[in-house]
């Protein structure tokens, strides 16, 4: 945990884990499929790697894309 990319991607990934755990406790007809969480989790890992290897623009763009994916597809603030 040495760079800002480590902290930001870990925060996004932690929020993703909390969302998954919260949704897995929901009634069965309202549960998400686990494969919906794969792209943002992988995106966090790749963004962290890119950020730590001096590819800042790509890392920031990927972090924004991951957050967009979470907001658009997983809809953490939607009433269920």
Image (cartoon, rainbow, N blue to C red):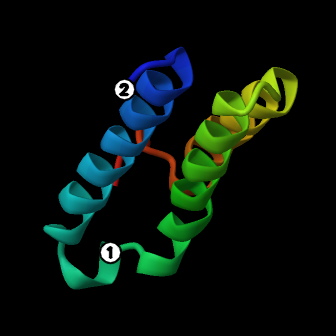
Residue located beneath label 1 in the image: 31
Q: Is residue 42 left or right of residue 68?
A: left
Neighbour class for label 2 at 10 Å: few (<14), some, many (≥20)? few
Neighbour class for label 1 at 10 Å: few (<14), some, many (≥20)? some
Label 1 element class: loop
Using the image as rendered, state which of residue 49 and residue 16 is in the foreground. Answer: 49
Task: Tell me which numbered mark, 1 or 2, is placed earlier along the sequence.
Answer: 2
Q: Residue 57 occupies which quadrant of the picture?
A: top right
Compute the Cα span from label 1 to label 2.
Answer: 33 Å
In this rendering, the count of numbered labels is: 2
Q: Mark 1 against mark 2, which lies toward the viewer?
A: 2
Using the image as rendered, state which of residue 36 and residue 39 is in the foreground. Answer: 39
Residue at 32% over, 74% down? 31
Q: Is residue 35 visible?
A: yes
Q: Residue 33 occupies which quadrant of the picture?
A: bottom left
Residue located beneath label 2 in the image: 1
* Above-or-below relation of 39 to 35: above
Residue at 39% over, 35% down? 10
Residue 47 is labelled as none
| Image position, residue 4 (x, y; %) | 52, 16
| Image position, residue 25 (x, y; %) | 13, 68
| Image position, residue 78 (x, y; %) | 43, 43
Q: In this view, does 65 lie to the left or right of 52?
A: right
Label 2 element class: loop
Residue at 66% over, 50% down? 46
């Amino acid at each position: 945990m040495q760079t800002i990319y480590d902290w930001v991607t870990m925060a996004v990934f932690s929020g993703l884990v909390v969302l998954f755990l919260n949704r897995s406790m929901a009634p069965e007809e309202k549960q998400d499929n686990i494969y919906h969480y794969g792209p943002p989790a992988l995106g966090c890992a790749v963004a962290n790697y890119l950020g730590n290897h001096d590819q800042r623009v790509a890392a920031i763009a990927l972090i924004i894309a991951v957050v967009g994916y979470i907001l658009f597809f997983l809809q953490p603030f939607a009433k269920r």
